[in-house]
């Protein structure tokens, strides 16, 4: 078996385990805040958004730096660093008794975590250019599978043994993932990476070099255009996420004592859809062009988001989120594939870091402002706003102009 295929399978499992743990507690923040004494729904909504946004916000600023640093010292080390950061800070969250302390821990988690870019770079740097879309799509299914299972697992944990245990389980899963990478993943290091031994005195030089690499990547107009489209789509898609539990409660048809489980199922709808179809979007991008594929999928995602504002039952919300998820699934493989084909292999980590930062910053701002905006226009109004933003971003993507077309290769 080719080395990159073996790493693909191992990193896929790492991403699945980590994402499952992370998504086991993120949807539960509104319910957790209630359990520690917060009662006002507007306050719960605002704090839930801020807490969910904390880690993506700080990760957005550090992502390009960690990616560029990984280009110089090795991507495997960056993946282990991210998993260990999640292990430590999420475990500490289980002891937090105030929203302020939870926020501090979430911010610190974001500074040192961010496992998707190093995982993606570790695998794709050894993959042929005409396979970038499908390999990226197939690898992203690991995060989607974890995101689909995580909310359900977290909901069951919260309903049975308590909300705090969701943090403990997430921490232990991330530790398991880190150990697996250390023991089994083999990185094909460049000569420069193999010969480099990082000493404390080297850190200023590495920092300056990494920042120069990031700035040079951002200077490319094609990269900036992709980052803008990705940002707008993710911002729109995340507006209603932190208070989705409140929307499910507002619909009023969840069985008594199972609100957490039903909320987990609704969260999982999008993840299930994207898990099933993401590889298909990656293949379409390799064959027909990643820019055109990006435009089509986000326009359709916006069209499927709009009806969510008018549902009257949880079942209808689940179906519509499944449909929207099947379209928004195309965002990740096309965006990361575009980052790959518009950068050199030596700067691949920095390019993926920038893409991750655009997604992370959009997630953070969407999470943080969704609850506040809902206070003005209502939860249903958030879905209308989300739809408008996503369809607008799709129209912007149509103007990108460039296309990367390759013959359809075998999937890994």
Image (tube, rainbow, N blue to C red):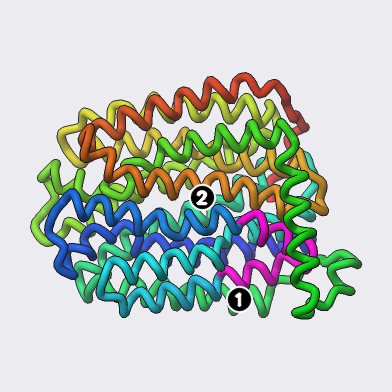
Is 132 within the magenta? no
Provide the major secondary structure of the magenta segment: helix
Q: Which residue is mark 1?
A: 180
- Can you tell which of label 2 and label 1 is closer to the viewer? 2
Q: Would you say 192 lies left or right of 305 here? A: right
Q: Given contact means CB atoms under 8 Å apart, are the residues at marks 2 and 1 in contact? A: no
Residue depicted at 76% across the width and 69% down the height? 204
303 in relation to 247, above or below? above
205 and 375: which one is in front? 205
Q: Does residue 94 appear left or right of residue 22 in this picture?
A: left
Distance between the alpha carbons at the discs numbered 2 and 1: 26 Å
Left or right, residue 244 beside residue 227? left
Question: For residue 70: magenta?
Answer: yes
Q: Is residue 226 left or right of residue 236?
A: right
- Could you say which quadrant of the image residue 261 lies in? bottom left
Q: Residue at x 22, y 63 (%)?
A: 33
Q: Which residues are magenta?
A: 63-82
Q: Where in the figure is residue 15, as x and y percent of width and height?
A: 55, 62
Q: Is residue 131 above or below residue 396?
A: below
* Residue with the mark numbered 2: 360
Please identify the quarter of the rendering in which residue 168 is found: bottom left
Is residue 305 visible in the rendered structure shown here? yes
Residue 2 place in picture, x, y as percent: 79, 60
Query: What residue sits 84% from the left and 68% below the top?
Result: 193
SS at mark 2?
helix
């Amino acid at each position: 078996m080719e080395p990159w295929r073996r790493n693909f399978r191992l990193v896929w499992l790492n991403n699945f385990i980590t994402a499952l743990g992370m998504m086991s507690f993120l949807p539960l923040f509104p319910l957790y805040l209630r359990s520690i004494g917060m009662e006002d729904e507007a306050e719960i909504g605002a704090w839930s958004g801020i807490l969910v946004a904390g880690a993506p916000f700080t990760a957005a600023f550090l992502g390009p730096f960690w990616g560029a640093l990984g280009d110089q010292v090795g991507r495997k080390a960056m993946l282990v660093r991210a998993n260990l950061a999640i292990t430590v800070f999420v475990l500490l969250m289980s002891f937090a008794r105030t929203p302020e302390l939870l926020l501090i821990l979430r911010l610190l988690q974001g500074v040192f975590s961010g496992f998707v870019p190093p995982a993606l770079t570790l695998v794709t740097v050894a993959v042929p250019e005409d396979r970038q879309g499908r390999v990226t799509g197939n690898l992203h299914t690991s995060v989607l599978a974890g995101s689909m299972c995580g909310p359900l697992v977290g909901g069951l944990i919260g309903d049975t043994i308590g909300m705090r245990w969701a943090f403990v389980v997430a921490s232990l899963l991330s530790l398991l993932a880190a150990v697996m990478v250390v023991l089994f993943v083999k990185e094909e290091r460049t000569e420069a990476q193999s010969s480099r031994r990082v000493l404390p005195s080297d850190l200023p030089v590495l920092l300056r070099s990494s920042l120069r690499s990031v700035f040079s990547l951002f200077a490319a107009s094609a990269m900036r255009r992709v980052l803008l489209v990705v940002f707008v789509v993710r911002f729109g898609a995340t507006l209603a996420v932190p208070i989705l539990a409140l929307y499910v409660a507002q619909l009023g048809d969840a069985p008594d004592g199972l609100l957490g489980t039903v909320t987990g199922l609704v969260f999982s709808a999008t993840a299930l859809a994207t898990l099933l179809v993401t590889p298909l979007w990656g293949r379409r991008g390799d064959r027909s062009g990643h820019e055109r594929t990006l435009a089509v999928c986000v326009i359709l995602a916006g069209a499927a988001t709009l009806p969510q504002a008018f549902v009257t039952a949880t079942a209808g919300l689940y179906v519509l989120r499944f449909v929207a998820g099947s379209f928004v699934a195309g965002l990740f493989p096309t965006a990361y594939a575009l980052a790959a084909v518009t950068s050199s292999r030596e700067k691949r980590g920095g390019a993926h870091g920038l893409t991750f930062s655009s997604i992370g910053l959009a997630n953070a701002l969407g999470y943080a402002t969704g609850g506040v905006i809902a206070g003005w226009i209502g939860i249903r109004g958030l879905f209308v706003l989300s739809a408008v933003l996503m369809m607008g971003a799709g129209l912007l993507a149509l103007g990108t102009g460039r296309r990367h077309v390759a013959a359809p290769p075998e999937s890994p």
